[in-house]
Amino acid sequence: MNDDVLESQRYWDGFAATDPLWAVLAFPDKSDGRWTLSEFMKTGEREIALLFHRFAELQLPMPTGRGLDFGCGVGRLTQALVRRMDRVVGADISPVMIDLARTLNRYPQRAEYICTSDAGLELLPERSFECIYSNIVLQHVAPDLSVRYLHEFFRLLAPGGLLVFQLPSHRQAQADAEITAMPDAAYRASIELAAPAPSQVAAGSPVALTFTVRNTSDHEWSQPRFGPLALGNHWLDERGELMVAQDDGRAPLLQIVPPGMSWPVLVTIRAPQSPGRYMAEIDLVHEGISWFEHKGSRTVRFPIAVAAAGPTGPASTAAAIKEFPIPEYPETAVPRPAAAPADAPTKARFPMNGVHRDQVMEIINRHGARLAYLEEDRRAGPEWVSYRYFVAGRSWRPASPAV
Ligand SMILES: C[S@@+](CC[C@H](N)C(=O)[O-])C[C@H]1O[C@@H](n2cnc3c(N)ncnc32)[C@H](O)[C@@H]1O
């Protein structure tokens, strides 16, 4: 174990021994043992329910086989993952966290916990996990070590598996919130459907769509400098001549988009109330300034038939969020903080780190994987630009034998 890893392990062990639930989810009003176990575990169920809902929205294959929860802490997310998957491994550097996770394990046949302080993830077999998830972990890990873990994740990911991780990129530049027009030449984008749109939907129902957006201009789109930019929509008549609805869906763009960058954007629009044949049109908008089309950029259009909603109301085209009931947990199962020892780590001083988005993208590309979605993330706090990366692993095929 190198010194960084040893120090990190001691650090998390210290918290795990005194106020473990708050160490995992450091809500200010929950320090000093103020989480109840059941409300704490419920946050894990909610988070994983939303994660699987997002998989459905992105039309990604639903993982059901083996999962890995990296940096599992006391198993808040591992336990929710195993309610949806056959087997899940929770891995953490802190033996004290791992002991607690084992105590709280309600699915011992299918969930197991391993401590990574000695061998890291090396003992886990390659291409063995259909889904790897890591949340609010890599932000506390030294950048070079995070990069090593990212490569490890790709070694462990099964062909076509899903890797989702949260990782800060860099510190936020000072924001200037004023809305100012960009140069006209900056309003150039290409927008393409990243997954097929439904050809028919029910009147009034939500329609989740994913697009690949590219900044085709020579200018940086910077929201801190110019104000909010978003993907939005219009509903046009069948021939695409008359606008029927101005817009009903908005997806914010990334805060900073350099020239040439492309990434997936998910937006949910709402079908018109009157049945008929429509043309959906998607464009970018600089809020308070202009739609990109009005500055000369091209929109994307595709036909959608809208059918009457059934007697029970509009059929939804978006998957429902499915939450499972959580088992009972005795409140005495985790230590409650007594008076903090004099040498206890100072609260609210979790180490924070990032790996730049460009470097992460380079690693994803190097492994032949596809970025299915990039979500701006607030978990690292307001001073960080941070993301949750949804990555679809490449479909691996053995090299064909020589003839
Ligand atoms: C804030 S907690 C999050 C726990 C869990 N992901 C959740 O959201 O419930 C961070 C966890 O990451 C673990 N951790 C920190 N560095 C790690 C590393 N290098 N390898 C594995 N786990 C690590 C800590 O021990 C701690 O349990």
Image: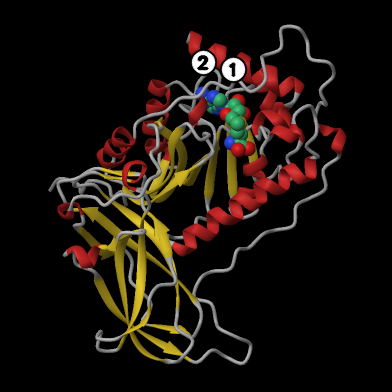
Residue 109: which quarter of the image?
top right
The residue depicted at 66 percent of the width and 38 percent of the height is 75
Is label 1's Cβ within 8 Å of ligand 1? yes
Ligand 1, what quadrant? top right
Other residues around mark 2 within 10 Å, as few (<14) / some (14–19) / many (≥20): some
The residue depicted at 81 percent of the width and 26 percent of the height is 335
The residue depicted at 72 percent of the width and 44 percent of the height is 41
Residue 118: which quarter of the image?
top right
Residue 358's spot in the image, x, y percent? 29, 36
Residue 58's spot in the image, x, y percent? 42, 61
Task: Identify which amino acid the numbered label 2 is placed on.
Answer: Val
Is label 2's Cβ within 8 Å of ligand 1? yes
Front residue (pair 359, 27): 27
Front residue (pair 233, 18): 233
Residue 83's spot in the image, x, y percent? 65, 53
Q: Which mark is residue 5?
A: 2
- Looking at the image, how many numbered discs can be counted on the residues? 2
Secondary element at image label 2: helix
Q: Which residue is mark 1?
A: 9
